[in-house]
Image: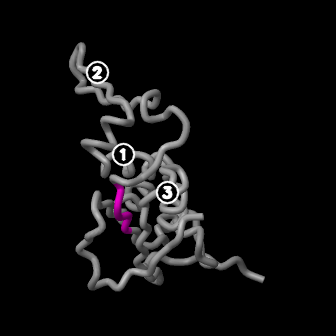
Amino acid sequence: MKTFMLKKEEVEHKWYVIDAEGKTLGKVAALAAHVLRGKNKPTYTPHVACGDNVIIINAEKVKLTGNKLEDKMYYNHSGYPGGLRERNAKTMIEKYPVEMVERAVKGMLPKTTLGRQMFRQLFVYAGSDHKHSAQKPESLEVK
């Protein structure tokens, strides 16, 4: 019996919507990364971007457990001396909720060109409106 390997020309990308309202950030990000990699499909092939497109809505209403709002820090560096900027999760969720969810998902994807290709299939919106209704996305429920 031969092992089935999917070719990139044969990939069919579906669209999914994840509503993050009241859900834990890690669980939303884990589900999104799982679908972006294509691990929810029986035709999963590790060396092909066979995942689906994911839309995450209500990113501003995502939850964090424990003391993460005050304790969890996000770091950026400009590359110049003294250019380190740090923000806690409370600031991120108030001012940059889209970036916070994107960082969580990106951290769960491979750190390769294939991972960057998968990340381009992620669309995050702070509110409940998105511009991908023409693709007829299916709803995914976070457990």
Tell me the magenta residue range: 55-59
Magenta span: chief secondary structure: strand
Q: How far from the left and from the top, in percent, is residue 133? A: 28, 81
Q: Considering only vertical position in the picture, is 10 above or below 31? A: below
Q: Is residue 73 left or right of residue 124?
A: right
Pointer 3 or 1: first along the chain: 3
Marks 2 & 3, CB-CB < 8 Å contact: no
Q: Residue at x 47, y 65 (%)?
A: 36
Pointer 2 or 1: first along the chain: 2
Q: Which residue is mark 1?
A: 100
- Image quarter (top left, top right, bottom left or bottom right) of the C terminus: bottom right
Q: Considering only vertical position in the picture, is 92 above or below 141? A: above
Q: CA distance from mark 2 to mark 1?
A: 18 Å
**Amino acid found under the numbered disc labelled 2:** Leu
Judge the density around disc 2: few (<14), some (14-19), many (≥20) Cα neighbours within 10 Å: few
Which mark is in front, 2 or 1? Answer: 1
Q: Which residue is mark 2?
A: 84
Q: Quadrant of residue 5?
A: bottom right
Which mark is in front, 3 or 1? Answer: 3
Q: Residue at x 45, y 73 (%)?
A: 52
Q: How far from the left and from the top, in percent, is residue 75? A: 35, 29
Magenta stretch: residue 11 in it?
A: no
Q: Which residue is mark 3?
A: 23
**Amino acid found under the numbered disc labelled 1:** Met
